[in-house]
Amino acid sequence: MAAEGNPFLDPAGENPISCKNEAPTVTYNWKNVTLDFQEATRELQLGELLHDEMFTLFEAMSAIEMMDPKMDAGMMCNFGNKKVMNFDQALAAGILKTADLSTSEHIGIMDSTLACLVTWLEGHSLAQTVFTNLYLHKPHMIDDKVMKAFSICILKMVDTIKNFVNKAAVFEEEDFQPVVYGYKLACDVTEVRAAGMMKEVEEELSRRVKSTRAKPGEDLDAAQFAQHEEALAVYTRIKFCRLFQQALIIFSKKGSDGVEEVERLLQQCLEVLPVLRRTIPLGVQPDPKAEGTNRADYPTVMGFEPLVNQRLLPPTFPRYTKIKPRADTMDYLEALIGRLRHVCRIVDCTSFHSAIDFLGEFSKTWPCVLSRSVVQLLYLPSPGRVLGSLTMVEVLKDSVRSFIRPPVLAQRGALSSHQQAREFVDAFLAHCVRPFTSLVHICGHNRARQRDKLTHLLEELAVLQDEADRLDTVLHSISVKLEVMQHMACFTTWVLHHVLKTMIQYLLSGFELELYSTHEYGYIFWYLYEFLYGWMISALSRADTFLMDQEARAEQQGKAGRGVKKGKRKKKPCPHSREIFVSQAYQNLCGGYYKTIVGFTLDGKLRRPCPEFDKEQVRYEHRFAPFNSILTPPPVQYAQYREMTDPYKYQPPPTPEDMYLAACKCFQNARMLLDNVQDLNEELTSVMKVSKTNFIVVKLLLSGHKKNSSSLPEFDFSQHKNFPIIRI
């Protein structure tokens, strides 16, 4: 047979290939490309990147992350020779104790578990946090009563939190990882039984605490005092977990009806936290001789195996997880309980406007995903239901009534009795439910995601504006036929108010998220100053005037019916006077920034990018693109902006000093307007400080201070996230 026809000969036709299971010899043709690579990169300027169809940003970032211990979680496997054991293997090897755990072991394991729980709440996966605790894998095989009850309680807590967050649906992938990787969350144990187990252990530990306590007239020696402190430490940890889990269950089952009971339980949690913090050193500490370079980032006490779930992780490179230190865990739990107590106040927000204001202010504190989810479910426990008892349509109807009181929603009147008019209004409010429910949900998302979702909300509100305009036209024609008080754009004004608030929130969020370059501040503040706050004041004033006219007419009709003589009527405060004053203050504040920036530009103290590489028009159109869907107020095009802000259209053109003087007046007006507002909250107090400081700074500029200085001005956002202090 010819050699080339024999499949068992190598290509040269000489040596027969062995059929035995021998590893084939591999020849590597490695080539050093370092010099070739360096030569090729010489064509690239500093900061330039090479883009290829087969090498995108995803591949580039993956290449950067690979083999980096802080980016590539798989690198943890490459350190040390320690064998990774699961629950059964660790138990068989005698590394894991299921009975007769010492008090210090109880404390250390509990603290490490709470640290893992908190790290999970910060957005890491269960596989890399909570389920690194082997005791949670098979809690029913634990003989130690304390550890068994605690493990089951933690699993039930994880299940409750997961259900909360999933139901509220205000989380993103960076916020929360709900995947349980096939682990059982003690589903065979009811919540009542789990609470009963914790209560039994708590009572037993309470007796131990009392037995080790100093009796009247006696002093404990060092050993006795240490024994008492250890008993107290375990007791308070069990009590804290039981109370916290009980509060979460009541939140879940009773909603807004169980707020008082929840507040009582959370207050008890706060009372025991100082003991938890004080007794952290009594627990077993991580082993400093543990193998691996990551021993400081993961618990290495008995029962924890950081790599036990490594094979459950996805094939992509997961982010590196660092477990929170125990002391920081206690701080986090204290802050979490404070947030949960605070969100209980949402039940007092009976009006939609007050609820949105509450949710907006709470969101500014960058709360955790659990507290954001709880407040969402307290206010909207089910679709279309507010605080468990009201429908969203009823709440929105009250919102319109309190804002502008349209005649069609009056308790008595020809228009409100008109069957067709009522049907039109009910249909419109039914269409409002979706976008205004979205507005509530947006307040529950993290701050970075809110901005993106506000863009979609503006599109929905634009459709609503068109419907409101058509509704007002129909109601006006009906009121003319009935010869009653005319219906004047009431629903349009109400929708416009929310559109403007959303547009303002969208622009201001860019400062908080640090999206704008300094040279962009000018047109952002100009848009707020010239248009948005101006339209807001106009809408509020229109609603105010309409409300006051209705009150005057109703009072006049009442007196005429009773035959009362006309007397001097006591002037009532305008319903929206506070919001008007605040909007005027913000308008003047933005005007002060805009005019100061124009002064800086004329003075040559504002660095701008080269127009050849960074066109202002492109940036402008990108920043205001979401406003293109809105009909009222109409979006301001870039050409119109340039025309309106061109300083050389005036003769003579303004000088930097002219702009600084105008800015001084704006900052001064903002401060004076806020002086007229009673009961300033923390937000407005901060704005007041910013206004005062900027007034002084711009006054210094006006006097020629640092006129010839080459240093550029700075904008300091430490006092307020949206309105900076100008520093020269």
Image: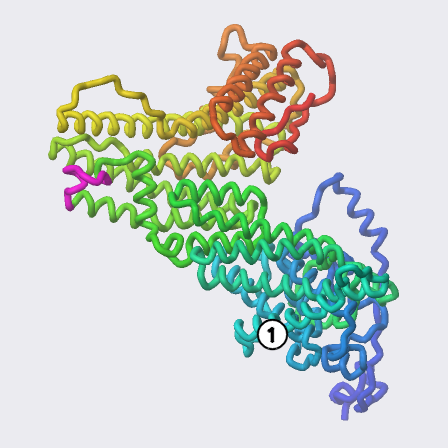
Q: Toward which corner of the image does residue 132 lie, by quadrant?
A: bottom right
Around disc 1, counting alpha carbons within 10 Å, would you say few (fewer than 14), some (14 to 19), or many (20 or more)? Answer: some
In which quadrant will I find the C terminus? top right
Question: Magenta residues?
Answer: 409-419
- Residue 448 or residue 160, whichever sits in front: 160
Q: Is residue 686 above or below residue 98?
A: above
**Residue type at numbered disc 1:** Met
User: Residue drawn 81% across and 67% down?
Assistant: 78
Q: Position of residue 378 (x, y in %)?
A: 45, 54
Q: Secondary structure at mark 1?
A: helix
Magenta stretch: residue 416 in it? Answer: yes
User: Residue drawn 79% across and 91% down?
Assistant: 19
The answer, for residue 108, to whether it is visible in the render is: no
Q: Position of residue 98 (x, y in %)?
A: 73, 79
The answer, for residue 623, to whether it is visible in the render is: yes
Q: Which residue is mark 1?
A: 197
Q: Toward which corner of the image does residue 105 lie, by quadrant?
A: bottom right
